[in-house]
Image: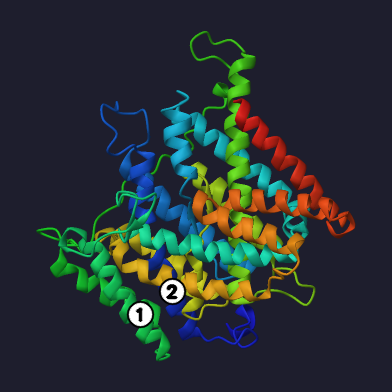
């Protein structure tokens, strides 16, 4: 095991990997409840049955696809990265494609399947890895810092500590009993910080567990009456694709350029969001865990991108939206994870969740918020390596750091960072410092912005 996962080489141990894996899983276990709710349209008034997939079917698909994709990541890439259906991508699936554009959820799954298959081809050819490696060093560091802030905001918002209902665009809520989740999260953060400063092994995981118990008297951790820890999973929506709907009008049964054009927009949006969300996540995680080889490239990047693509195809076949690498993996890295062994642990826990979902769904977002906020602090360290004295380096880095958390999008942070980097180098007549692939990305990004504006 030590030789296969290179535990000694990366300065870790079996126990640290297990704790890291459990921590990562607990930090992202919310997806088991959130993804089915979004994809099934839970809470949407007057939604007819069958317009979106069932909650139970999506729950099973979420757990199984996350388990398979994370297992592949652990065995193929040997990286401490967990995968699951991504937020944002699932909202686009349900609310934009199905409810907004009037497409069937089976057609949306078809777009996800084709996107994932396309990415497998690009990954095997090394094209995705080449694009990843073309991102300038300054932007790589900026992405890590931006992801830290992004993850911290996820934790703050999830726990209800920050809100847009404070009279400002965003602000801290009052810490009274009407905001019990915020109180519990802050208490958990204090405990987690103390444990971390004292170098207590598994401090982040212990913090999540303690905070979950603290939430019980506050009503944040809700234990239902007649609580049963075990339940049987529902059947997933297997191979529910609509290939005919790609180009044929459902009403007439005839080929339609308009229908094909609509599908292309759906496919391209999934492609774009997934591509750069994944690149940003990999860059952030690699910076946090120092997973770079002697050439300054991410260790096993090709295998990691391939695992991500396989996850998307698997998820589509099971009936869920795009599977992608999760930024919450950094919480496991903080707990000590450095190899794919932690990913194996996460994979096993997702399978356990199929049978013991009530237990895992007890953990409130207020309990995982302290871990995510602490990760934000740790990922800020890369900011000291950015040359802010050089405006052609500092301005693009600042824009990346600013845009990612404020737009709530990893991909947008990368997009505007690359565009501003090219503009700054062009204005300073330092064109030769920009890799050719980066120029190509800049043109693609600008074209995509114009395309979105004209839709």
Instruction: Tell me if residue 150 can be seen.
Output: yes
Instruction: Tell me if residue 126 can be seen.
Output: no
Applied colour scheme: rainbow
Q: Quadrant of the N terminus?
A: bottom right
Residue 21 picture location, percent across and down? 45, 73
Q: Which residue is mark 1?
A: 192
Question: Left or right: where does residue 368 sit relative to residue 211?
Answer: right
182 versus 423 height, above or below? below
Residue found 21% across the figure and 60% down from its top:
179
Question: Left or right: where does residue 179 sit relative to residue 124?
Answer: left
Mark 2: give few (<14), some (14-19) or many (20+) Cα within 10 Å: many
Q: Are marks 1 and 2 in contact (CB under 8 Å)?
A: yes
Residue 284 picture location, percent across and down? 59, 65
Q: Dividing the picture into quarters, in which one does residue 320 lie?
A: top left
Residue found 69% across the figure and 59% down from its top:
395
Residue 131 picture location, percent across and down? 75, 54
Residue 4 picture location, percent across and down? 63, 79
Q: Which residue is mark 2?
A: 374
Q: Quadrant of the C terminus?
A: top right
Q: What's the distance in space between the residues labelled 1 and 2, CA to CA?
A: 8 Å
The secondary structure type at the circle numbered 2 is helix
The secondary structure type at the circle numbered 1 is helix
201 versus 128 height, above or below? below
Question: Left or right: where does residue 154 sit relative to residue 44?
Answer: right
Residue found 63% across the figure and 51% down from its top:
276
Residue found 71% across the figure and 51% down from its top:
420
> Which residue extends farthest bottom?
198
Q: How many marks?
A: 2
């Amino acid at each position: 095991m030590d030789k296969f996962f290179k535990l000694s080489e990366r300065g870790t141990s079996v126990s640290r990997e297990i704790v890291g894996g459990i921590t990562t899983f607990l930090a992202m276990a919310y997806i088991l409840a959130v993804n089915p709710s979004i994809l099934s349209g839970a809470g949407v008034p007057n939604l007819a049955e069958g317009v979106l997939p069932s909650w139970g079917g999506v729950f099973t698909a979420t757990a199984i696809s996350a388990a398979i994709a994370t297992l592949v990541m652990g065995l193929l890439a040997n990286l401490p990265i967990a995968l699951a259906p991504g937020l944002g991508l699932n909202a686009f699936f349900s609310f934009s494609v199905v409810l907004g554009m009037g497409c069937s959820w089976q057609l949306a799954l078809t777009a996800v399947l084709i996107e994932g298959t396309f990415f497998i081809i690009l990954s095997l050819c090394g094209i995705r890895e080449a694009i990843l490696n073309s991102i300038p060093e300054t932007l790589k560091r900026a992405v890590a810092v931006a992801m830290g802030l992004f993850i911290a905001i996820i934790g703050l918002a999830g726990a209800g500590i920050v809100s847009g209902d404070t009279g400002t665009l965003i602000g801290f809520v009052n810490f009274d009993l009407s905001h019990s989740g915020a109180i519990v999260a802050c208490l958990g953060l204090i405990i987690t910080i103390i444990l971390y400063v004292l170098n207590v092994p598994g401090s982040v995981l212990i913090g999540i567990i303690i905070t979950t118990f603290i939430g019980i008297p506050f009503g944040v951790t809700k234990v239902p009456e007649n609580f049963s820890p075990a339940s049987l999973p529902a059947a997933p929506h297997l191979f529910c694709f609509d290939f005919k709907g790609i180009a044929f009008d459902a009403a007439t049964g005839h080929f339609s350029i308009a229908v094909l054009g609509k599908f292309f927009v759906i496919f391209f949006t999934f492609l774009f969001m997934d591509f750069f969300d994944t690149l940003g996540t990999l860059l952030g995680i690699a910076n946090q865990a120092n997973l770079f080889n002697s050439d300054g490239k991410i260790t096993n990047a090709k295998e990691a991108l391939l695992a991500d693509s396989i996850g998307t195809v698997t998820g589509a076949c099971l009936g869920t939206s795009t599977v992608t690498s999760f930024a919450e993996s950094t919480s496991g890295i903080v707990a000590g994870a450095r190899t794919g062994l932690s990913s194996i642990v996460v994979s096993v826990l997702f399978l356990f969740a199929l049978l013991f979902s009530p237990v895992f769904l007890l953990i409130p977002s207020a309990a995982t918020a302290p871990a995510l906020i602490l990760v934000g602090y740790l990922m800020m360290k890369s900011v000291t390596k950015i040359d802010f004295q050089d405006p052609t380096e500092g301005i693009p880095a600042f824009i990346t750091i600013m845009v990612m958390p404020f737009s709530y999008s990893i991909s947008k942070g990368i997009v505007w960072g690359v565009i501003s980097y090219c503009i700054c180098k062009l204005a300073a007549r330092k064109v030769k410092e920009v890799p050719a692939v980066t120029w190509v990305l800049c043109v693609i990004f600008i074209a995509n912005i114009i395309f979105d504006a004209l839709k």
